[in-house]
Image (tube, rainbow, N blue to C red):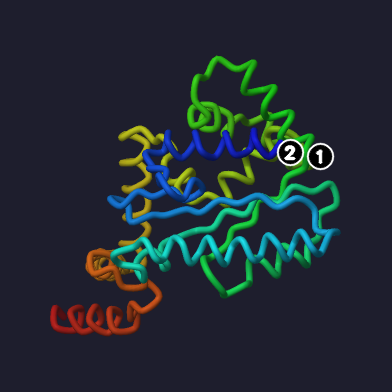
Amino acid sequence: MNDYLTQIYTQLFAELNYTQDSIIPNFFFNTEKNSFYCCSIINETENEALVEKWMSEQKSLFQTVMEKQGNPQRVKNNTTHLVFYLTENENNNFVYELEEDEYYFKKNVIVLDHSEIKDFKNHFTDSLFETYKLFLENTVDTHNLFENYKKYGKKDFYSMILKFYIKIPSLYLSKSVSSNELETLKESIEKNLVKEDLLNFVNQLNENIDNYIKTDKELKNIDVETVLDIWIGENDDEK
């Protein structure tokens, strides 16, 4: 199952316009999007020696990635480490420890069992789609599958797809939306913002976020209170 899972994420990132590093095979990057991913697989957690070995490998992976970067801080701040945790008996404490671990890269843990992966492989093979990206996009919004999952919570190919969308930000952001749908959504949001007199504030905040992205600074450092003060001051001047 490890080999097939590796095949999935390697091909999927290629379909999402990410480049696989030539030296670090589980590192994928898109410099235009300022987005980076590391991927690793861990099986079960009962064997402490294997877990310790995996932890050591992650330290080595982090060091290798960082040593290659011209701007290491930029990469560190924008890298997501996808940890595929394969288990038949999920250890929630272990998942929590991984995702809350502040060392190395930020971690998103995708918990899967073998039946989910096997079912995914069967459904993808039987589908008419040639890429994983198209298969995911055209399956995730299937109403009856979603309703069945909400009702029964069954672990199958669809639960695996949902986990991918929850844990892989670039997959969610890549989902196709027609221009009409996007414009309708934009108009609806702006209409409600105008009602609350917040549209100008949101525009100011977006402008500040764009400026921060261009400078490669951490987004968490943006001073929203300052933006709010500026917006309030501008509104007072207009009055």
Q: Quadrant of the C terminus?
A: bottom left
Residue beneath disc 1:
152
Question: In this image, 11 relative to 40: left or right?
Answer: left
Does 41 appear above or below 231? above
CA gap between label 2 and label 1 equals 5 Å
Can you give x and y, in whole percent of width and height, for residue 212 in the image?
27, 70
Q: Is residue 17 above or below residue 233?
A: above
Q: Quadrant of the N terminus?
A: top right
Q: x%, y% of residue 73?
A: 36, 71
Q: Secondary structure at mark 1?
A: helix
Decide: marks 2, 1 in contact (CB < 8 A)?
Answer: yes
Give the percent coordinates (x, y) of residue 94: 75, 65
Comparing 125 with 160, the one in front is: 125
Could you tell me which secondary element the residue under label 2 belongs to?
helix
Instruction: Look at 68% across and 39% down and name the residue there.
Output: 2
| Amino acid of disc 2 | Tyr
Which mark, residue 149?
A: 2
* Residue at figure coordinates x 53%, y 29% from the top left: 132
Q: Which mark is residue 14?
A: none
Amino acid identity at mark 1: Tyr
Which residue is painted at 39% across and 36% down in the image? 177
